[in-house]
Image: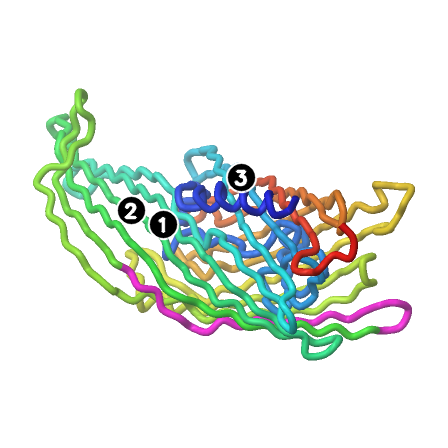
Amino acid sequence: MIRKIVLGVALASTCHTFAQQGTASPYSYYGFGDQQFKGANEIKSMGSLAVYSDSLHINTLNPASYAKLQTTTFSLGASYKGNNLQNANSKEKTTSGSFDYLALAFPAGDFNVAVGIMPYSFVGYNIQNTNINDNGMTISRQYVGEGGLNRTFLGLSYKISKNFSIGVNGAYIFGDTETSLTKFIADNGEGVAFDRGSRIRNLNNYSGFSITGGFNFEQPLKNKLKLYASATFSPEMQLKNDQTKTLATVRLSTQTGLQEINATTTQNSNEEMLLPMNYSFGAGIGNHLKWFVGAEYTANQTSKYNTFYKYENATYNDYMKIGVGGFYTPKYNSFTSYLERMTYRAGFNYENTGLVINQEEIKGINANIGIGFPVGRYNSNINLGFEYGQKGNTNMGLIKENYYGVNIGLSFNDVWFKRRKFD
């Protein structure tokens, strides 16, 4: 059964990955866009911790976790997000939805293998800005961006001992973004609005590789308790960017809309863009298959973006995130109560994105809860999660985001590559 699910969903979801619009955040204007969580939705519901792993779920945040899997596991997820945007003068509501990940992992001799695809980042904004210059001219600007990057990966893990495992993910990152700035000027003195303006449009095509290594350590304690520890590391890498820039005069007509005239196009090939070094480490304690609570710290050298991105009012510091979370399963093998076999998750994280606009640091908080519903054989499950968060503020003319989201993750487990004694 799982083979049919894998084939059908893989074809549909992979095709959809390249065309979706997964964000409406104005902060996706900067860098590669709004970077996405790169783990499964059940992990997200626990505060986005990479430190915990089990034999039922694919933890794509830490490749060492694949060594825990005992059966072939297929995992996919999707989410819906609502966003309330506000500045000092106005408010706006937006919604977006996205395919989150598609992954398959299986034991293969001494190693466990995982493959998958997921979004890396999204670009999605439409911002209008109007002001009056010193000459009394009204200048109207419209910033529009769409597209995003995807990440497909191959991972290997190896169990060195009963309590210690290592792993590595190799990923290929690719995708397109299109951004534009359109500007019109009106003469307030004569009350005449010019019907011509200018537009700069950039089409970026990114491609490159990244690598992530990790380890997991588990130490049994007294009273059925177990100590968990993990770490991951991604070295600094480069993406290639083939950029096509178009500079044009634009004409606004009530009959034909906005038209480009006198366009000039230039191309820059193989421009190098930075993927900064990233690392995380975490620890936790729990009773196996009963409960777990842990914390994790993640950092990224986004300050090096300053070498590659030049903005009039923005710079980068280093990124950091602190997350705490866990789960509780009353009785995973209960024969009498389905509620006792369900898993209840919760988590919270705080992040400093590293982005500084008008000397204001863009920070965010995020809270999650989730429920896991066991289904079928081999402890397959459906995981439903809810999140609420905030990013940014309204100081210095900035925009504050208040968002909520609903996500669903499916984790199917089956036995492959083993000869059956009975059919």
Could one spot residue 23 in this view of the protein? no
State the extent of the magenta-drawn residues as a range: 221-241
Residue under the point 20% across and 46% down: 200
Q: Is residue 169 left or right of residue 242?
A: right
Query: Residue 255, position in %: x, y?
Result: 17, 20
Q: Label 2, secondary structure: give it.
A: strand
Q: Label 3, secondary structure: give it.
A: strand
Could one spot residue 84 in this view of the protein? yes
Q: Is residue 151 left or right of residue 262?
A: right
What kind of residue is marked 2? Thr
Give the alpha-carbon distance from disc 1 to disc 3, as whole Å.
Answer: 18 Å
What kind of residue is marked 1? Tyr
Give the alpha-carbon distance from disc 2 to disc 3, as whole Å.
Answer: 22 Å
Most foreground residue, 167 or 229: 167
Most foreground residue, 239 or 392: 239
Residue tagged by mark 1? 29
Q: Earlier in the sequence, mark 2 or mark 3?
A: 3
Is 234 a magenta residue? yes
Residue tagged by mark 3? 81
